[in-house]
Amino acid sequence: MRISTVKIISLLFFILSAFYLYTAHQIRVFSFDEDAPFNAKTFPIYLGYLGMFLSALYIILPERTSTEVNHKVLDYKSSLFLVLITIVYGFIILKAGFFLSTSLFLFLSYYFLGERRWIWMFILSFPFVALFMFLLHGILDIYLRDPFLKMLGIIG
Amino acid sequence: MIEGILIGLETALSLKNILMVMMGCFFGTIIGMLPGLGPMTAIALMIPITYGFEPATGLILMAGVYYGAVFGGSTSSILINAPGVPGTVATSFDGYPMAQQGKAGKALAIAAYSSFAGGTLAAIFLLFAAPSLSKVSLAFRSPDYFALMVLGLTAVSAFSAKGQFLKAMMMVILGLMLASVGQDSLSDITRFTFGNINLLDGISFVLVVMATFAMSEALTIILKGKDPSRATQQISLSKLGSIRLDKEERNKMLKSIPRSSVIGFLVGVLPGAGATIASFLAYGVERNFVSDEEKQKFGKGSVHGLAAPETANNAACSGAFVPLLTLGIPGSGTTAVMLGALLGFGIQPGPRLYMTHPEIFWSVIMSMYIGMVILLILNLPLIPYIARILAVPKNFLIPLILFFSVTGIYLMSFNNFDIFLMIGIAVVATFLRLYKFPMPPLILAFVLGGLMEENLRRSLLISDGSFEFLWDRPLTAIILTLTITIISWQVYKSFKK
């Protein structure tokens, strides 16, 4: 017997709901609130039960429309790369500052997606981010912390 | 009233005030297009500028910014599937697919016309019905609000694609679960934070919407890049930017506008409901009004599906002024900021505002209409150029979408935990989307989660823990009967197959 991926996702949702319900029961409320008709854990407890009920229903009931995906045509490599580069961007944005990290993120993303028009790659990374920063910092007065530009003496 | 309208027109049509509306619409559109910066931020940014102005001029500028930002939000929804504000989420359901089919100009034009019509009709409703509607808005109690939210969530699930009701309901629960993360609003007890201080304030709406829409869309495009069934079409720039609607499209739009205006305005009048519920509700109702053939086009670039939420969200923006101006109760975050500005000018909104400051009351209402006209005049010629964003090659567009998503989040919190959380949610959302789990129910549930819990809490506390509040009030009972009807209809349909 073959179990569809959607049923497996529903099973995972059932487990998530069960874990959520367990965590909801662990929420510590004030002692005077313990027997109140509604406290901080009431709504999450309802949600946990509802989540388990709905996912169990999906697992039990027969599927009327199948949703299978052809994994052979999916480009996991490029997607994974983009996710990884965004994670790295997230790591360096505070240390290197907005300008340098964002410009590098954009430039590298263009490159790894197969772009080789170097002039456009440059324009749409460093000058583009500079312009965006000017809009935020210079016009809208939204402060962006940037140790790199501060070191260069461009922003205060 | 005629005298009041004339006073309002005189004030709103002065050269200085027209210039203010134009400036407001222009800057509002630009700020609204930037993810993470919605109407609330746009108006907040204007407050220091308006301090030196007369109250009417300041409010006129803010009204212009408000409408401009809502339209700007629709633009990013349609072009890159990145709704920066909750009110424009429903716009992306059909606006984005339409833009993907090479009709970005048309989609933006439909959005502009519908916004204009919705805002104009709502301004007229506001003119005649504001005082009496303020009483209606006060008639809604916590049980009614709770029932209304349950109805909204059930309806949005029922209106998802055929045979997906259970999947959509699971997404509703997931959205409510995400909304429950952070401090409990009443007791400040932390929930589901697992000791992480970054989660104390909960997960931001912009983060969830950017992750489930913009970022996950970008990842899906890359993921399906090799899929021959999704081979990208070469679309000419002139077709992409064309704003000409044919007769059929115009007729469809004209049919959707009146009913969505009424829905949008009435929902906007209710404090706390606002443009988000209005647009979702209008989208769901519209789907029920159209033919079976048209129903199949919903979610795939339907004119009705785009016109309805766009009309409703602008009508709701006008409707939100009813409780603000007549009762002094802000119906949404944006009107709360405007209330702050009014108080800053030394004006106390409320039932006596007509008498004490008629020029302000009426000039704000008249400037809304003028703002709509100016917004249309300013934006229509720009649409062909704005639409060309989609002609940017995929290799450039995808990283730029990721950049706007990450920046939108970074601008709000200035920490990288939110960026990682967004990436995590986006990866899960991309996987769920592959298996046709709909995202709109998750977003609506996330938006309504806090309000729903709040209203359930009040209802249960008032009724001393008894669930009798569900049928005690006729209004609650009617709304819940509608909900049960929708669920029963879904069950009947699944057995009928």
Image (cartoon, coloured by chain):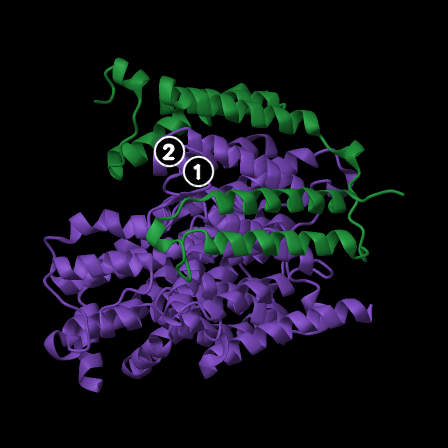
B242 and B339: which is toward the camera: B339
Q: In which quarter of the image is the C terminus of chain B?
A: bottom right
**What amino acid is found at the position of numbered circle 1 in the picture?**
Thr
> Disc 1 vs disc 2: Cβ atoms closer than 8 Å?
yes
Residue B451, can we see it? Answer: yes
Q: How many residues crowd around disc 2 within 10 Å: few (fewer than 14), some, or many (20 or more)? A: few
Q: Can you name the residue that lies furthest to the right here?
A: A1
Using residue B98 as the reference point, say whether residue B387 is left or right of it: left
Q: Mark 2 lies on which chain?
A: B
How many callouts does the rendering have? 2
The residue under the point 53% across, 31% down is: B399
Q: To which quarter of the image does residue B326 belong? A: bottom left
Q: Name the residue under label 1.
A: B193
- In this structure image, what is the colour of chain B? purple
Rendered location of residue B94, percent (x, y): 59, 57
Q: Quadrant of the N terminus of chain B?
A: bottom left
Using residue A90 as the reference point, say whether residue B289 is left or right of it: right
Q: Judging from the image, what secondary structure is the residue with disc 1 in? A: loop
Q: Can you name the residue that lies furthest to the top here?
A: A151
**What amino acid is found at the position of numbered circle 2 in the picture?**
Ile
Q: In this view, does B470 lie above or below B150?
A: below
Q: Name the residue under label 2.
A: B197
The residue under the point 24% across, 47% down is: B45
Q: Judging from the image, what secondary structure is the residue with disc 2 in? A: helix
B320 and B256: which is toward the camera: B320
- In this structure image, what is the colour of chain A? green
